[in-house]
Image: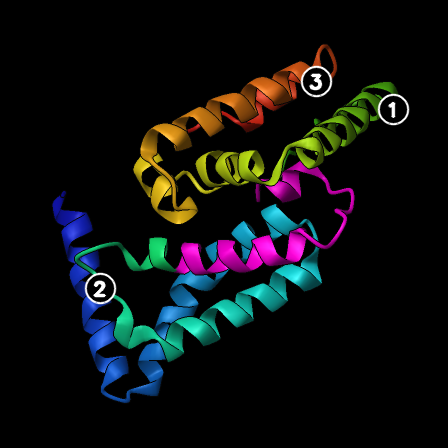
Amino acid sequence: MTDNRANGKAEIDAIIGRALDGDQHSYALLYDRFAASLYRLCYSLLMNEQDAEDILQESFIYAFKNLHRFDSRKASLKTWLYTIAVSRCRNTYRRKRFLTVDITQWLGMQLKAPLSEAPEAAAIRRDANESIAQALQDLSPGLREAIVLRYGQGMTYREISEVMGCPQKTAESRVRLGHQRLRKSLQPVGMGLLEELLRVH
């Protein structure tokens, strides 16, 4: 573990300790630190703003009520929160259909078109976005989760396996298979944009 990660873990542990002692401000600090990334995760899986907001709030309520059960020796707080949120997302997207979503929203990125882009080029970009969004919706929930966690959240395969509750090799396989299916679905439309968006920086 690097010094920065060790310091970050120590800081989180200290905040958790104060929260468990009854300091309400510490709960607010934890919420502020993780809410944005947790919302993006939920939105990426559910593709619906209201559902994502609901799951975000439900996840934090559950986490704060059960904060005494969290063991930092077994997982990071981020991984623990993601596990809670993914579980609730599964319950939601099993019974709901997905809405079309812009791929830049899905990945939490802003892809800006050139100022001089011609109407024809803009139409091609729009069609590519729609094709990618549809391809993502066509993935099975397990593959979508793996892709979202890997490329949308930048998690390691070990972290993905913890969140999804599966062996690391399974997580690696799901990411690989999900990427392969996206490539197959998008041939030949949108592949350049897909490669740009799914590149891990």
Q: Is residue 63 above or below residue 166?
A: below
**Percent from the top left, x then y, of residue 123?**
85, 25
- Residue with the most extreme bottom position: 22
Q: Nearer the viewer, residue 82 or 35?
A: 82
Give above or below for 195 relative to 26.
Answer: above
Please state the extent of the stretch shown in magenta in the rendering: 81-109
Question: Which residue shows up at 46% across the image and 41% down it?
Answer: 149
Side of 120 where 49 appears, left or right: left
Badge 3 marks a residue whose secondary structure is: helix
User: Is the residue under label 1 in contact with that under label 2 (CB below 8 Å)?
Assistant: no
Dots 2 and 3: beta carbons under 8 Å?
no
- Look at the image and tell me in which quarter the N terminus lies: top left
> Mark 2 sits on what residue?
71
Task: Say what amino acid the circle numbered 2 marks.
Answer: Asp
For marks 2 and 3, give the CA distance.
42 Å
Q: Amino acid at mark 3?
A: Leu
- Taking depth in this image into account, of 166 and 63 the one nearest to the observer is 166
Name the residue: 21% across, 55% down: 74
Q: Residue at x 34, y 36 (%)?
A: 167
Figure disc tally: 3
Nearer the observer: mark 2 or 1; the answer is 2
Circle number at residue 186: 3
Residue 135 % position (x, y) = 70, 28
Q: Nearer the viewer, residue 74 or 10?
A: 74
Report the residue marked by disc 1: 119
| Dot placed on the residue nearer the N-terminal end, 2 or 3 | 2
Colour scheme of this structure image? rainbow
- Hey, which quadrant is residue 110 in on the image? top right
Structural crowding at the residue carrying mark 2, measured as other residues with C-alpha within 10 Å and reported as few (<14), some (14–19) or many (≥20): few
